[in-house]
Image (cartoon, grey):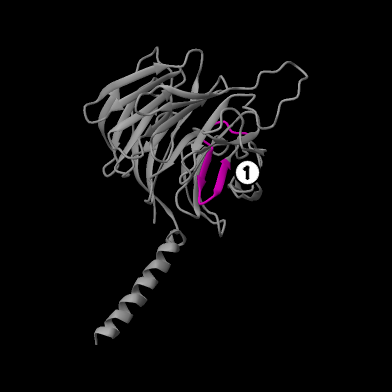
Amino acid sequence: MSRRRLEEAILKSRELGSSDGEESEKYSELFVRHRVQLAKDPHSIYSLCFSPSGKQLSVGFGNGAIQILNVEDGQVDKTLYSGSRKRLPITALQYHPRSENLLVAAGADGLVSIYDIKSEINVFSITELENEINALDFCMDGSVYATAGKDKKVRLYDSHTNEVLNIFEAPEYFYGDDVPFTSGHTRRIFALKFHPSENHIFLTGGWDDSIKVWDKRMAKEARRVIDGPHICGPGIDIKDNKIITASWVSRNALQLWDFRTGNHLHDLPFPTTTMQGEFLYAAKFCTDSIVLAGGSGTCTACAINLNTQEILGDISLLNKPVQTVDAACGDRLVAVAGVAGNLHIAELC
């Protein structure tokens, strides 16, 4: 009897393991949980970030305001900064990967601010002079975070001391000179993403129609370059050695790449019309095989199954561009926001 029970337990565990691997395939639609009206800024939401647990959602506004929402009920829990007419947009937000209480915010005014969420205190700030920061991310273990933006430089910060560890410079060249393909970006950077399982590797992309793969241990040059994507927002994500890119172009804007080789795998369908075009700003992996992307062409965000290319659902911002999306790590929750303060919290089901 005990042997039979053991065999049944082993069989059941194998079945559960198999179903876990296929978890992303079972989702068939996108259901909107909350349509949140946030009145801090009538113009725009520029950045979103779920906390590591997925219980909080931080929101960055065009007037510099930062709010923390309770994901369960869609209500504002805390206001870290109330905003000002003189402030520029909060363009990037990231939680420390091992803390619900530590949030780093970066803005178009070049300001990097670190907040203790529980006490609602700005514990540290630094300004990158003459820069507009567009992108920010932590490495896997949280020891380093990086910023990038208008000045085409990538700065690596020690997350404990907040001192600059290294700066990946933009290439210095005169008109007509050849620029090595592994040098820095030649135009503004709009996206920066660390590899989820390789602590030293990160990707950047922007207006120069290239994705550069960096190793933070290397002093100057990129390891590899992927040519093509025209990135104008948080349009790079990586999962299971696959890269998704969202380009601000009319057609074939959503593309899948092999991280190991840099090869283009295939384009993904994004529903649009001939008159509208796709023009995507943002993309994010929700699961191993589902991505969320949105932009200004149709003013919608769509959840798309990578394997079947099926559109699971869309979220419309009513003729207002989608500027940012995020997905809760290890969960089915997603968030979509953009112009006019539109914010939707939805789930795959």
Dot 1 crowding, Cα within 10 Å, few <14, some 14–19, many 20+: few
Q: Residue at x 40, y 15 (%)?
A: 87
Task: Residue 335: give x, y in percent of width and height.
Answer: 40, 41
Task: Decide: is 48 above or below 303.
Answer: above
Depth check, front residue: 142 or 275: 142
* Foreground of the two, 247 or 20: 20
For the C terminus, the image quarter is bottom left
Q: Which residue is mark 1?
A: 273
Q: Residue at x 49, y 42 (%)?
A: 195
Residue 172, image x and y in percent?
66, 18
Q: Residue 127: x, y in percent?
A: 42, 15
Position of 7 relative to 52 (above/below): below
Query: At which x and y percent is residue 80?
Result: 29, 25
- Tell me if I can see residue 307 in this picture: yes
Q: Secondary structure at mark 1?
A: loop
Q: Magenta region: which residues?
A: 230-245
Residue 168 forms part of the magenta stretch: no
Image side of residue 134 versus residue 35, left or right: right
Per the image, is 234 magenta? yes
Quadrant position of residue 96: top left
Whether 21 is drawn above or below 146: the answer is below
Left or right: residue 169 versus residue 124 is right
Q: Residue at x 47, y 61 (%)?
A: 25
Q: Amino acid at mark 1?
A: Thr
Q: Is residue 13 left or right of residue 273?
A: left
- Front residue of 208/346: it is 208
Question: The N terminus appears in which quarter of the rendering?
Answer: bottom left
| Residue found farthest to the right | 176
